[in-house]
C-alpha cells in the first residue's frame, strides 16, 4: 500500500471510475449503499492514520459507485418511459427534434433523426404523456430541422440483440446514447405521410449551428463532385451518409478507418494548426505578452476555441465529443504550465468523459483513442530516450544540433508515433474488427498528414472564408477536395499490396489483458534515468534503495512469466477445443428471418449450412452475425458450405463467408436463381476455389470423420414448382444421435419424402420453413418424431412466423420447441450417445 503514496490522486480516481464503469458494462453492479459504506470506511481509515487502507477503500467506493449510472442506463425498464407500448406495435409519437436529420450511411434514401417524445400511444388511438428519446428512420426527402415538432407513426422496436455469441452489443450501444426505442416510419397505402411537422420550437444556439452546417454542406455540394464531396462532408461536418461500402473498405483495410470519422486525429490537426497560428500571431503582434511567457497560453486558448467551433459544427457524434474533451484537457494543462504531464491530461480527459457519458468504456472509439494515446506517450518516452542516448552523446561538449540530425530525429519520431499507435490499437482492432493491417504503418504515415492538414485544415479554412469571400474559398475547397480524393486513392492502392492486411480471430478479454500486460511491461522497461525507479526511490518507507533496480527487474520478470504462463494455458485450451474435440457440435445462429447453422465435426472440420439473409441491402448477416461467431470460436476456415435452396434469406450471408473463409466445397440442391446476388455468391465460390457438389436423394452418403451425412431430399428426378420443396434435406448421424436439417420444404415436399421411404427419424429437427403453417404437417412430425424442434426465425417478423398451430403440433408430439427469436443461438452437443441442448439466453431476454 505504501507504493500508492507516490501515485497522483488523479490517476487513482480515474482508474477507479474506469474499473467501475467497465464492471457496469459487463452487468456487474453494486448498489449505491455499497459505495456509501466503503466511502465511510475510507474516511474512518484516514482519520485512524491508515492512509494506504484509506486509499484502497476510497478506490473501491468510487468503483462501486461508478457502476450505478451504468446500471440505470442499461438495465432500467426503458419500456415504461413510452407508456408501456408493446414491442413491434404500430404507434404514434409526438415530440421535438433535438438535432437535424442525417442520411443513413450507405443508404442515402433514408433519413435518421432522434425525437424527444412528449406524447405517445397506439396508432389511431389516444396519445398520453410519455418521455424518452426515439431514433426514427424514415424514407423520402423530408424537410426537417432542429426544433421541429413532429408526429411520427410507425413500427416500434425496443433495443434488442439477436442473441449470438460474438455479436456486437447493439442494445447497449443504443442505450448508452440514451435511445429508448426506434421507429421505422415508412409510407403505406393507408398512411402516405408517416412523418408530419406540427410545429416548431426556436433553438437559438442549435439553430445557428445547423444553419452553419447546412451552409457548409451546400458550399461543398455546389463546388465538388463525387467522391470529393462525400469525403469533405464527412471530414468537415460529420455527414457520413454518402460514404459507400467501397470507400469505407479502402480505409478500413489499411487501418485508417478513423480518417472518415471526426475524432481525435482531426481535432488534433485543427488544434495544432490553430496553436501554431496563434503562437506566431502572438509573437508577431504582441511581443510584450510573448516576453512574459504567455505565447503558449494564448496559443492554447486559440486551439481550444478552434476545436470547440469545429466540434459544434461536426455534429453530435460521441467520437467528436470525446476528442473535444481530450484536446481541451491538454489545452488546460498548457494554461496551468503542466504541458509535460501528458498522462495526467489523458487521465483528466477520461474522467470527464466517463462522468459525462457513463458506460463509455464499452465504446469502441473510447478504447481505441485512449489505448493509442497512452501507448504513444509511453512509447515516445522510450523512443526519445533511446534516440538521444544512441545519437547524442551526453558526455560530449555541448554543441548545437545540426539540421540534418534534427531532421532525422523528426522523421524517425514521426514514424515512431505511427508505430506506437499501431501497437496500442492492434489488439483492440483484432477484437472489434477481426483484422490486422500490416500496411497501416506506412499508409498512416503517408495519408494521415495529407488528409489531416490538407483536407481537414484547408477545408475548414475554405468553409470559414466562404462566409466572407467566396471565390478564394472555392479554390481552397477544390484543393482540399482533390487532396481527399488522392488520400482515398492511396488508401485503395495500399489495400491492394500483397499481404497488406489479414483476418484474425477474436481474442478473448483474458487474451486482451495478457497482450496489453506484455506491452506495458515492455514500455515500462527501465532505461537510463528511468522514471519508474526514481519514483520508487522517492516512496517513503522503502529501504535498501540501492537494490531497487534488481527488485524492479525481478518484479517485471515475475509479471512476464505469469502472463506468458497464462497465455500458454489459454493457447493449449483453445487448440484442444478447436482441433481435438470429440463431439459433434451444431449451433443454430439467430440471423433474423433466415437460417444459418454452424456444424463442428469431431476433430477440426467445419460446415456452414445456410448463411442467413436480409431483405435490407445494408445488413449482411454473413459479415455481422455468422463471421463474428466463427471468429469468436477461433474458426478461420469453413471446409464445407451447404445451401439448402437459393432464397435470399438462406444465401444472403454466404458471399462474405466465401470471400473470407476459403471454403473447400459448396453443396447445393441443384436449383438456380435469377437473383443477381446469387450470381455474386457463385462467383465468390469459384474465386475461393470451392468444389461444387449437387446433393439430392440419389447422392451417396458422405462420411466426415465419424459423422455420416445423408441427403434425403430433394427427391431425384422430381420436378418441383416451388423452390422451397427443392430444398436440400440433410440427415446427420453420429452414433445414436441424429440431426435433421429440413430447409424450407412445405407439405408437398414432406409427403414426397415420406413416400420415398427415406429415413427421417431424428432427435433434433431444424423445423422446415421457419414454422410456417404450410409446413410441419402432422405426418412429417410423426415420421421424424423429434425430441427437440429448433425454429429459426426473425423477431416480430413480417410473415408472423411461427404459426401457433405448428407450435402446438410439436408440443403434442412431446417435442421441446426452441426458437432463435426468443432463445438466441441454440447449441446441440452430441457425443454419439447423448445430446446436450442449450440456448444463448433465456426466452424473452434481450
Image (cartoon, helix red, strand yellow):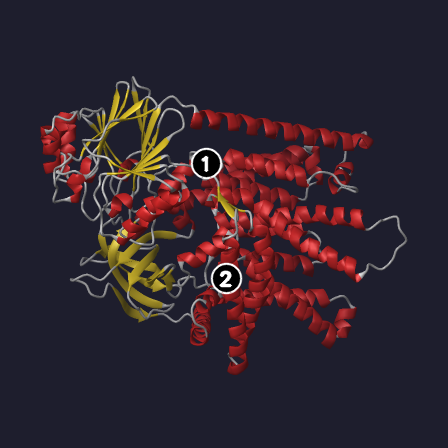
Residue linked to disc 2: 489
Q: Nearer the viewer, residue 137 or 565?
A: 565
Q: Nearer the viewer, residue 813 or 472?
A: 472
Q: Quadrant of the C terminus?
A: top left
Q: CA distance from mark 1 to mark 2?
A: 46 Å
**134 is higher (above) or lower (below) than 28:** below
Q: Residue at x 18, y 24 (%)?
A: 761
Q: Nearer the viewer, residue 512 or 195?
A: 512
Q: Is 277 left, or right, of 608 in this rendering?
A: right
Q: Nearer the viewer, residue 302 or 767?
A: 767
Q: Of the numbered discs in the image, which one, if any, rests on residue 192?
A: none
- For the image, the number of numbered tags is 2
Tell me where residue 255 appears, x and y as whole percent: 52, 51
Residue linked to disc 1: 28
Q: Earlier in the sequence, mark 1 or mark 2?
A: 1
Give the secondary structure at mark 1. Answer: loop
Find residue 717 and report its image quarter.
top left
Q: Is 612 left, or right, of 428 in this rendering?
A: left
Q: Quadrant of the N terminus?
A: top right
Tell me where residue 510 appears, x and y as whole percent: 52, 33
- Specify few, some or many for label 1: CA neighbours under 10 Å numbering under 14, 14-19, or 20 or more: some
Amino acid at each position: 500500500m505504501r507504493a500508492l503514496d507516490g501515485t497522483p490522486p488523479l490517476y487513482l480516481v480515474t482508474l477507479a471510475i474506469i474499473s467501475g464503469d467497465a464492471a457496469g458494462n459487463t452487468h456487474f453492479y453494486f448498489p449505491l449503499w455499497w459505495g456509501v459504506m466503503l466511502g465511510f470506511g475510507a474516511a474512518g481509515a484516514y482519520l485512524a492514520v491508515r492512509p494506504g487502507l484509506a486509499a484502497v477503500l476510497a478506490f473501491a467506493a468510487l468503483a462501486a459507485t461508478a457502476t450505478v449510472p451504468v446500471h440505470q442506463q442499461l438495465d432500467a425498464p426503458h419500456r415504461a418511459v413510452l407508456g408501456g407500448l408493446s414491442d413491434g406495435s404500430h404507434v404514434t409519437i409526438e415530440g421535438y427534434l433535438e438535432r437535424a436529420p442525417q442520411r443513413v450511411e450507405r443508404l442515402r434514401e433514408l433519413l435518421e433523426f432522434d425525437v424527444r417524445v412528449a406524447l405517445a400511444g397506439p396508432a389511431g388511438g389516444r396519445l398520453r404523456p410519455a418521455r424518452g428519446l426515439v431514433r426514427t428512420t424514415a424514407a423520402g426527402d423530408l424537410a426537417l430541422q432542429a426544433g421541429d415538432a413532429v408526429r411520427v407513426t410507425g413500427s416500434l422496436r425496443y433495443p434488442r440483440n439477436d442473441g449470438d455469441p460474438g455479436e456486437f452489443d447493439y442494445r447497449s450501444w443504443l442505450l448508452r446514447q440514451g435511445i429508448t426505442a426506434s421507429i421505422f416510419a415508412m409510407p403505406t397505402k393507408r398512411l402516405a405521410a408517416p412523418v408530419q411537422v406540427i410545429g416548431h420550437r426556436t433553438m437559438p444556439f442549435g439553430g445557428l449551428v445547423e444553419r452553419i452546417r447546412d451552409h457548409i454542406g451546400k458550399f461543398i455540394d455546389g463546388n465538388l463532385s463525387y467522391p470529393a464531396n462525400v469525403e469533405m462532408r464527412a471530414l468537415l461536418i460529420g455527414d457520413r451518409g454518402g460514404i459507400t461500402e467501397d470507400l469505407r473498405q479502402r480505409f478500413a483495410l489499411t487501418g485508417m478507418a478513423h480518417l472518415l470519422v471526426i475524432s481525435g486525429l482531426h481535432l488534433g490537426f485543427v488544434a495544432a494548426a490553430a496553436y501554431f497560428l496563434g503562437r506566431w500571431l502572438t509573437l508577431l503582434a504582441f511581443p510584450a505578452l510573448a516576453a512574459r511567457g504567455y505565447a503558449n497560453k494564448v496559443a492554447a486558448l486559440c486551439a481550444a476555441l478552434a476545436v470547440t467551433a469545429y466540434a459544434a459544427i461536426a455534429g453530435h457524434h460521441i467520437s467528436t465529443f470525446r476528442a473535444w474533451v481530450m484536446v481541451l484537457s491538454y489545452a488546460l494543462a498548457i494554461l496551468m504550465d503542466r504541458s509535460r504531464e501528458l498522462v495526467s491530461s489523458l487521465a483528466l480527459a477520461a474522467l470527464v468523459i466517463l462522468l459525462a457519458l457513463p458506460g463509455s468504456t464499452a465504446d469502441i472509439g473510447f478504447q481505441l483513442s485512449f489505448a493509442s494515446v497512452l501507448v504513444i506517450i509511453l512509447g515516445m518516452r522510450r523512443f526519445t530516450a533511446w534516440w538521444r542516448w544512441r545519437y547524442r552523446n551526453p558526455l560530449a561538449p555541448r554543441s548545437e544540433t545540426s539540421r540534418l540530425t534534427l531532421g532525422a530525429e523528426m522523421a524517425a519520431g514521426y514514424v515512431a508515433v505511427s508505430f506506437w499507435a499501431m501497437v496500442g490499437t492492434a489488439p483492440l482492432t483484432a477484437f472489434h474488427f477481426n483484422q490486422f493491417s500490416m500496411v497501416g504503418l506506412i499508409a498512416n504515415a503517408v495519408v494521415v498528414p495529407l488528409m489531416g492538414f490538407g483536407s481537414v485544415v484547408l477545408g475548414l479554412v475554405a468553409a470559414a472564408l466562404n462566409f466572407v469571400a467566396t471565390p478564394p474559398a472555392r479554390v481552397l475547397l477544390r484543393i482540399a477536395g482533390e487532396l481527399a480524393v488522392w488520400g482515398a486513392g492511396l488508401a485503395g492502392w495500399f489495400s491492394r499490396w500483397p499481404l497488406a492486411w489479414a483476418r484474425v480471430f477474436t481474442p478473448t478479454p483474458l487474451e486482451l489483458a495478457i497482450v496489453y500486460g506484455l506491452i506495458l511491461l515492455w514500455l515500462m522497461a527501465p532505461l537510463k534515468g528511468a522514471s519508474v525507479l526514481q519514483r520508487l526511490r522517492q516512496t517513503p518507507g522503502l529501504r535498501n534503495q540501492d537494490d531497487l533496480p534488481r527488485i524492479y527487474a525481478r518484479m517485471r520478470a515475475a509479471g512476464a512469466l505469469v502472463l506468458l504462463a497464462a497465455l500458454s494455458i489459454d493457447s493449449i485450451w483453445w487448440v484442444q477445443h478447436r482441433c481435438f474435440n470429440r463431439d459433434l457440435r451444431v449451433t443454430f445462429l439467430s440471423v433474423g428471418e433466415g437460417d444459418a447453422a454452424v456444424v463442428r465435426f469431431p476433430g477440426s472440420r467445419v460446415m456452414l449450412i445456410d448463411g442467413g439473409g436480409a431483405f435490407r441491402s445494408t445488413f449482411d448477416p454473413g459479415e455481422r452475425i455468422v463471421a463474428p461467431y466463427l471468429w469468436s470460436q477461433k474458426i478461420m476456415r469453413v471446409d464445407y458450405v451447404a445451401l439448402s435452396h437459393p432464397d435470399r434469406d438462406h444465401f444472403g450471408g454466404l458471399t462474405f463467408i466465401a470471400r473470407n473463409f476459403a471454403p473447400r466445397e459448396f453443396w447445393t440442391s441443384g436449383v438456380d436463381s435469377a437473383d443477381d446476388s446469387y450470381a455474386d455468391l457463385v462467383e465468390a465460390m469459384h474465386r475461393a476455389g470451392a468444389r461444387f457438389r449437387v446433393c439430392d436423394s440419389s447422392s451417396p452418403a458422405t462420411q466426415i470423420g465419424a459423422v455420416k451425412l445423408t441427403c434425403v431430399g430433394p427427391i431425384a428426378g422430381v420436378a418441383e414448382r416451388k423452390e422451397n420443396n427443392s430444398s436440400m434435406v440433410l440427415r446427420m448421424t453420429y452414433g445414436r444421435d441424429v440431426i435433421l436439417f429440413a430447409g424450407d420444404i412445405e407439405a408437398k415436399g414432406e409427403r414426397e419424402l415420406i413416400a420415398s421411404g427415406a429415413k427421417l427419424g431424428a432427435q433434433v429437427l431444424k423445423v422446415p420453413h421457419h414454422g410456417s403453417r404450410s409446413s410441419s404437417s402432422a405426418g412429417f412430425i410423426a415420421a421424424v418424431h423429434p425430441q427437440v424442434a429448433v425454429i429459426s426465425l426473425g423477431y416480430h417478423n413480417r410473415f408472423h412466423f411461427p404459426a401457433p398451430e405448428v407450435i402446438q403440433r410439436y408440443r403434442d408430439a412431446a417435442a421441446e420447441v426452441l426458437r432463435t427469436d426468443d432463445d438466441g443461438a441454440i447449441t446441440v452437443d452430441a457425443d454419439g450417445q447423448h445430446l446436450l441442448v442449450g440456448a444463448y439466453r433465456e426466452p424473452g431476454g434481450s
